[in-house]
Amino acid sequence: MSSLNSTCISGSAPVALSQKFLCNPGFYCPNNSATTPPQYCAPTPECLLTRLQTVRNICNDAQGIYEPLVCPPGHYCSLGGKQISICPQGYFCPLGSAEPFRCGITSICPEGADRELVMDGFIFIFILDSIILALLLKSFRRVLDIIRWRILRTCIEKSTFVASPELSHIDTISEGNLRIEDENVRKFVASVRSCVGQGDVGFSFGFEELSLVLANGKTILAPQSGHIPKGSIWGVMGPSGAGKSSFVNVLMGKTKQTTGQIYVNKVAWKTVKYKKLIGYVPQDDIIMSECTIRESILHSAIARLPRKWSDKQRNEHVDTIISCLGLTDIQDRIIGDQISWAISGGQRKRVSIGIELAAAPIALVLDEPTSGLDATASLSIMRLLRTLSKLGVTVVCIIHQPRPEILEFLSGVTLLSRGYQVYHGESSGLTGYFSHLGFDISGKPNIGDAVLDIISGQYALHTESYRTLTIHDLVESWRSNSSRIQPPLETNEQMVSSSYQVELLARSASGRGQSRTRQTYLCFVRSMKQQWRRMNSFILEIAVGSISGLLIGLSLYQLRGQHFQGAYYPPFQILSSALNYTTVPEIGLLCSLAIGLAAAAPGVKTFGEEKQMYWREASAGHSRSAYYIGKVIATIPRLTISAMHFTTFYCILATPRMSFWTMYLTNLMYFYCIYGLASTVSTVVRREDGPLLAMIVSLVIGVFGGYGPPLYNVKEWHLEWFWRLCPGIWLTEAYFDQHLIISGHLYDLDAAARWTGYVRGRFGTDVLLLLVIGTVYRLAAFAGLVFIDRNRQK
């Protein structure tokens, strides 16, 4: 009811807020005293709408002469409420300030500031980005110098040899010249001998009734027996689908045989015991595309050669291998990927072989080593392999289409057709054996092609008489004649394995490879180089994070940093304006989604693009944990810089009440979680599906932050435990706690916490649990690497 004598502007009767003088901190009470305690006046309609509809804007004038007024932004009201002062320079005073808040050293806070414009992040990223740019320009200039030098060298070479095409041709083939190659090979042989030792130690492989049958009953390898002597260079040949790769994988222990037994020096085969002594060159050229040729071979050498070797010995060993493979002139060239190759396919194949030769293996298995190579390079590699075999290294090659010269290098051959063994013996015995079966191949220009024709079913090409033959006939013929035609090949080897040889092999294997700590360092350095050479990807990640932070900050700019407004403490709660408990949870949701978009795809690349390389190195005896830890540590600088850019651009517009470095720490931990989650996703899905799925999963866990559905509803459903499993809830709770600290004197924060469902006062726990969840994700990713596709790591 209005009254002419009312002290309220609206004319309504005032309501006493207290029976004694009282002025809450953050309020201006100029007219209140013991005789005129604070009163509440019903607001005018215009003021009522303002209070109900807005958060930051309130009625600037009290609705009655005895009504307390909350201290306006840009000012502070001393305790007691009798004095209102403008916020001095170097301080900021948000709504309801009882005292000014000091700004940071680098912050911009003019007189009357109601928020702090923090410049710490901009200064940090300016310095950091300047350093990165300077390094990039230095690297770019170095690349330009190399290009100019190569162009100059090419021009000189052309001017020298252009008048004499014949000399140019001679110069081209001189890379494979036997005189030069012999010199390099002699160095390599000496290097390998110093690694393997002078003892008569090597691998001979025996197999008896060896077979491989799939779970569905399909026979991949029919039962077969044979022996590959130490120091031989053995070829495995057959048409496509004959089971060549399967045979080699079973022989090397990469695939578990169904029946039969494999022997090494007449001792039952144990893969783990000898895997460091065996080099395996896969058919596909699995190489780190961001590394140079020398870096790839040197990494293998450091990680796999004996620990007692010095760095000088390793470098000399690598130099010799690079020379033997004809890669000296391009050893510092980055390999490149399948889209942007910096080297040819033949050069990639030689690098792949060099990675295994760097380990000085006692046995070497190569899946189609000459595929993609020209004639000269193929012969050069086969000469090197033959020299290795004379040293005592057992070499097993899958040969698809051998040249006549290459076939002459082979000590023996295993012929397979549809998984059946049709020949296993000396390569020189091929002509006689198939002549015995009625095939005239002695005059053929390429015995290997002729044999492949026969075992592929093209019999009429190599026999004049018509005979109806089947693969079964060839198999049965070999079984009936093998004991007579195939004499023992171990003329220089005792078939009884001595305990001394086994001991030397075990000792050699145990002394190979670096410690786990050293391997971790090597993998870390290599990963850092990869990231540096994929700078475009990193810049894109930073740009996405920066733009995301900028857009979120822009959407909050109008609030001028007042992201929370609660109910005033009693007895002033009736003076409260519209409550705002949801903006901070909304900020948590937006930030978690933005970080998920910025970090999910880069997190997938940590492991998703290197599975095959990981499988190759794991099968060679590299430490799985060292590889993983090195990769994880290498991502720390990346996500640290990304989090800094995101936080800086968000804070410059949103100007939250939360401390900049506190928010950066929280965002950094969430980046850490998303990287870990994306790594986990990359280990369980295909490379092509990883980025999309990781992004979707990151968005999903961001929704579980307590904004929608609200956390108090989740508690009613008794599902809070599920929300607490996701990092989004801990990020939002940390935001909620820190945004409210500065207003603790003004608002009833406990009431806000009860309504929203968040727990206040445990920021350290929130951040720690983000760290724990991110670490759990990484442990899950490591388990995925180790246990998924485990057969490819043997």
Image (cartoon, rainbow, N blue to C red):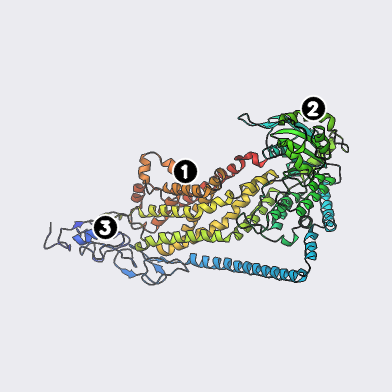
Residue type at mark 2 is Ser
Which of disc 3 and disc 2 is earlier in sequence? 3
Foreground pick, 646 / 358: 358
Which image quarter: residue 112?
bottom left
Q: Which mark is residue 432?
A: none
Image: 689 above or below 477: below
Alpha-carbon neighbours of circle 2 within 10 Å: few (<14), some, or many (≥20)? Answer: few
Q: Which mark is residue 53?
A: 3
Q: In what element is the residue under mark 2?
A: helix
- State the residue lying farthest toward the left: 4
Q: In what element is the residue under mark 3?
A: helix
Foreground pick, 311 / 2: 311
Residue type at mark 1 is Leu
In the shown orientation, is residue 544 left or right of residue 478? Answer: left
Residue that mark 1 sits on: 725
Q: Which mark is residue 480?
A: 2
Q: In what element is the residue under mark 1?
A: loop
Image: 543 above or below 699: below
Foreground pick, 32 / 523: 523
Q: Is residue 630 visible?
A: yes
How far apart are the alpha carbons under marks 1 and 3?
A: 36 Å
